[in-house]
Image (cartoon, rainbow, N blue to C red):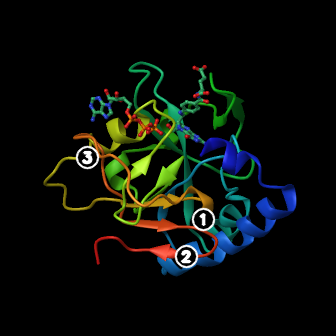
Amino acid sequence: MRNLRKELTPEEQKSAAKALKINISQVIKDPKNARVGTYISNDGEPSLDYVFQWLWQNKATPFLPILHPFTQVHLLFQRYEENSPMTTNRYGILEPELNCSHVSPVAALDFILTPLVAFDSQGNRLGMGGGYYDRTFAQIPPDASHRPKLIGVAHQCQHLDALPVASWDVPLDYIVTPERIYCPHR
Ligand SMILES: Nc1nc2c(c(=O)[nH]1)N(C=O)[C@@H](CNc1ccc(C(=O)N[C@@H](CCC(=O)O)C(=O)O)cc1)CN2
Ligand SMILES: Nc1ncnc2c1ncn2[C@@H]1O[C@H](COP(=O)(O)OP(=O)(O)OP(=O)(O)O)[C@@H](O)[C@H]1O
C-alpha cells in the first residue's frame, strides 16, 4: 500500500492535492477559528499544501504533529504559521521547532487530519506502525465535553474492503480522498 501511494506521478499528486482541498472544505464547513491538526506529507502521502492555504485564508489555525520529546511515543500538536521555524524529525519529516506556548492540548483541536497507509469504509485506519496517533487519541478523556473529529486523508488507492481492528485502534469519523468523502458512522 505504501508503494501504491509512492508510485503516483507529480501531476497525479498535484491534482489529488487540489481535489482534497475541495473535499476537506466540505467536511470542515465552518473554518473560521477552527483548530485543525494537519501533517506535512511524506512517503507519497497526499499533500496538504492547498489545505494550508485555504485554512490560513479562512482564519483557521493549522497545528502540526511533533514527536513528543519526553515520552517518544505520543504526538504534540503545535500551531503552524507560514514562517514557523522548522526542523526534521528522526523519520526525516518536517516539524515545527518546539515552542511550548504554541502547543495545543489534543482534546482542544476541532479536527485532526491524519495520514494513513490504508483505510476501510468502516473508518478503520492502518498507519505507519508507530502507534503515535492511537496513543495520542487515547489521551482524550472519554467524558471530554469536546473532542476532535478525526479525518483520515488518503489517495483512493489506499482503500481496502476490510482491515483487521486492534483494541487500541480509534476509528475515524471521516475519510477524505480526492474522489470521495466517507462518513462511516452516519
Ligand atoms: N507525514 C506524516 N507525519 C507523521 C506521521 C505520518 O505517518 N506521516 N506519523 C504517524 O505516525 C508520525 C510519525 N510516524 C512515523 C512512523 C514511522 C515512519 C517510517 O518511515 N518508518 C520507517 C522506518 C524508519 C525507522 O525506523 O527509522 C518504515 O516503516 O519504513 C514515519 C513516520 C508523526 N508524523
Ligand atoms: N493507546 C495505546 N496504548 C498503548 N500502546 C498503544 C496504544 N495504541 C497503540 N499502541 C501500540 O503501538 C503499536 C503500533 O500500533 P499500530 O500498528 O496501530 O500503529 P499505527 O496506527 O499503524 O501507527 P501511526 O499512528 O504511528 O501511524 C502497537 O503495537 C501497540 O502496542
Where's residue 84, x and y in %? 69, 43
Q: Mark 3 or 2, which is nearer the eye?
A: 2
Q: Which residue is mark 2?
A: 180
Q: Is residue 51 left or right of residue 13?
A: left
Q: Which residue is mark 3?
A: 140
Q: Is residue 59 left or right of residue 85?
A: left
Looking at the rendered structure, the secondary structure element under dot 2 is loop
* N-terminal label among 3 and 1: 3
Looking at the rendered structure, the secondary structure element under dot 3 is loop
Q: Are marks 2 and 1 in contact (CB under 8 Å)?
A: yes
Looking at the rendered structure, the secondary structure element under dot 1 is helix
Q: Which residue is mark 1?
A: 156
Residue at the extreme front:
161
154 and 17: which is toward the camera: 154
Residue at 25% across, 46% down: 140
Q: CA distance from mark 3 to mark 1?
A: 29 Å
Where's residue 180, x and y in %? 55, 76
